[in-house]
Image (tube, grey):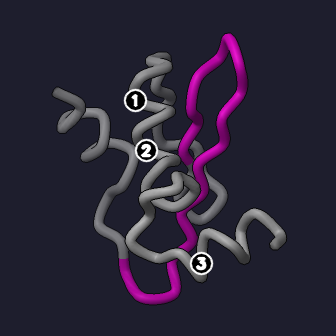
Amino acid sequence: LWLRTMTQAFPDVKKGDRLTGIYEPRVGVRFLHNGRYTANVRDADFAQRFFAIWLGPQSSEPAMREALLGK
């Protein structure tokens, strides 16, 4: 469903690259690769699911979740 957008947002990622996702209400999720804008996804369902990978209570990396949430 979101494959084309994800392919655009995350080009050929190499070791040391930085990927940034920023959620802004009414704007969507903006993605940057090494500080360069790559994509914008205006889909609230996508935003929720994407950020839940790291921030959701069912994250596969609970220690990272706690660190990201400042706990």
Decide which of tag 2 and tag 3 comes sooner along the chain. Answer: 2
Q: Which residue is drawn at 58% across and 56% down?
A: 55
Q: Which of 25 and 59 is in front in this view?
A: 59
Quadrant where the C terminus lies? bottom right
Label 3: which secondary element: helix
Marks 3 and 1, Cα distance to the nearest angstrom? 21 Å
Disc 2 residue type (three-letter): Phe
Residue 19 screen position, x and y as percent: 53, 63
* Residue at the (72%, 77%) spot, across then down: 67
**Residue 28 in the figure: left or right of residue 50:** right
Q: Is residue 30 magenta?
A: yes
Mark sitting on residue 64: 3
Mark 1 highlights which residue? 46
Q: Answer yes or no: do the residues labelled 2 and 1 have beta carbons within 8 Å?
A: yes
Q: What element carries label 2?
A: helix
**Residue 52, above or below 17:** above
**In the image: residue 60, left or right of residue 47:** left
Number of callouts: 3
Q: Label 1 amino acid?
A: Phe
Looking at the picture, which amino acid does disc 3 mark? Met
Q: How far apart are marks 2 and 3 (CA)?
A: 15 Å
Q: Residue furthest bottom?
A: 15
Q: What stretch is highlighted in magenta?
A: 14-31
Q: In which quarter of the image is the N terminus?
A: top left
The vertical placement of 10 against 48, above or below, is below
Q: What element carries label 1?
A: helix
Q: Look at 32% across and 57% down and name the residue there.
A: 11
In magenta segment, residue 68: no
Q: Residue 27 placed where, x, y %?
A: 65, 17
Residue 25 locus on image (x, y percent): 71, 19
Looking at the image, the residue that sits furthest to the right is: 70
Q: Name the residue under label 2.
A: 50
